[in-house]
Amino acid sequence: MARVIAVANQKGGVGKTTTSVNLSSALALKGKRVLVIDIDPQGNATSGLGIDKFGVDGSLYEVFSGVFNLSSVILGTELPSLWLAPAHSDLVGAEVELSSTPGRELILKKEIARLNAQFDYIFIDCPPSLSLLTVNAFTAADSILVPLQCEYYALEGITSLMQTIEIARKQLNPHLELEGVVLTMYDGRTNLSRQVVHEAREFFREKLFQTIIPRNVRLSECPSFGRPIFLHDPSSLGAGAYEALAEEFQRRRRLADEGRNNEQVNSDQNGHAEKVVANQS
Ligand SMILES: Nc1ncnc2c1ncn2[C@@H]1O[C@H](COP(=O)(O)OP(=O)(O)OP(=O)(O)O)[C@@H](O)[C@H]1O
Ligand SMILES: [Mg+2]
């Protein structure tokens, strides 16, 4: 079963798309089968992966409208192990059109469940809002990855994001986890960046990824070439940072899975012990 990760922060321009595109590319280059689902009407993940958003036959708009299945809009990318479900500006309309549709928060979850192709990871690149599209992502996801830009007021709005995650957990998706928080656009020359790191560490503790993504010109050039950093400039600092993030992401996932398996073993053993006792009495 694929792990589904929503990349979200209602603040604009904090590095959601850059992280979706480059973390998924790094994992694909490690041999994982990865799907990026673009649910942002801006379609930046779509163009960032080299797909002409105006030239696609089907997109997330048609998926939300019920015209196409998710599996039928998936496209290959330049990386053999990375796929994309594209978006474009039509998707703005889906929100309004769905306003009175029952079960409208569940559309993406149902579509992901129906996927016939096997993926290790599915990343959902969310728009900068806590809209119905984002709620669909929170309902479909196993976890949320939050990029946080090293800037003034970085933590502003985090409370409402955490509240929305809590509401989604209570009402729609009790298993939703916080995958982690990743700091982006770090500039080691400024006190401000260092201060944000300090504050974020205090606030998120072990949920903060150790890997910090630096501000890097090569990363900012990627969207105009429609290529992930590993194809644009694999020797850049940005490529190194996203490679390190992918390593850390996988390491944490392994630890989390081992923890879960141990819990399972313990509860199985407890269950067995109870059964033995019950048989003896
Ligand atoms: N580490 C970085 N170094 C330099 N530029 C970056 C970095 N990360 C992102 N950028 C640039 O900053 C801008 C915003 O990044 P991005 O599009 O990833 O943010 P976003 O959160 O997805 O934005 P939106 O909220 O509009 O969807 C883009 O122009 C991107 O190229
Ligand atoms: Mg974006």
Image (cartoon, rainbow, N blue to C red):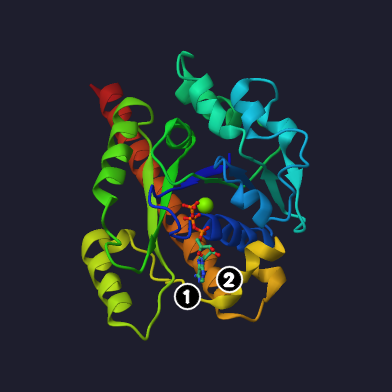
Q: Amino acid at mark 2?
A: Leu
Q: Position of residue 39 (x, y in %)?
A: 56, 40
Q: Which residue is at 28% across, 76% downward?
A: 192
Q: Which residue is at 28% across, 50% downward?
A: 157
Kindly identify which numbered label has been placed on residue 215: 1
Residue closer to the observer: 49 or 235: 49
**Residue 241 relative to residue 174: left or right:** right
The answer to whether residue 225 is seen in the rendering is yes
**SS label for mark 1:** loop
The quadrant of the rendering that contains the C terminus is: top left
Q: Which residue is at 77% across, 56% downward?
A: 80
For label 2, being within 8 Å of ligand 1 is answered yes
Counting every numbered tag in the picture gives: 2
In the rendered view, would you say 1 is above or below 171? below
Q: Quadrant of residue 27?
A: bottom right
The reply to whether discs 1 and 2 touch (Cβ–Cβ < 8 Å) is yes
In the rendered view, would you say 221 is above or below 3? below
**Residue 232 relative to residue 188: left or right:** right
The answer to whether residue 30 is seen in the rendering is no
Packing grade of label 1 (10 A; few <14, some 14-19, many >=20) is: some
The quadrant of the rendering that contains the N terminus is: top right
Q: Which residue is mark 2?
A: 219
Q: Amino acid at mark 1?
A: Arg
For label 1, being within 8 Å of ligand 1 is answered yes
Q: Position of residue 151 (x, y in %)?
A: 33, 68
Residue closer to the observer: 9 or 247: 9
Q: What's the distance in space between the residues labelled 1 and 2, CA to CA? A: 8 Å
**SS label for mark 2:** helix
Q: Which residue is at 33% across, 39% downward?
A: 165
Packing grade of label 2 (10 A; few <14, some 14-19, many >=20) is: many
Residue closer to the observer: 214 or 244: 214
**Residue 229 relative to residue 181: left or right:** right
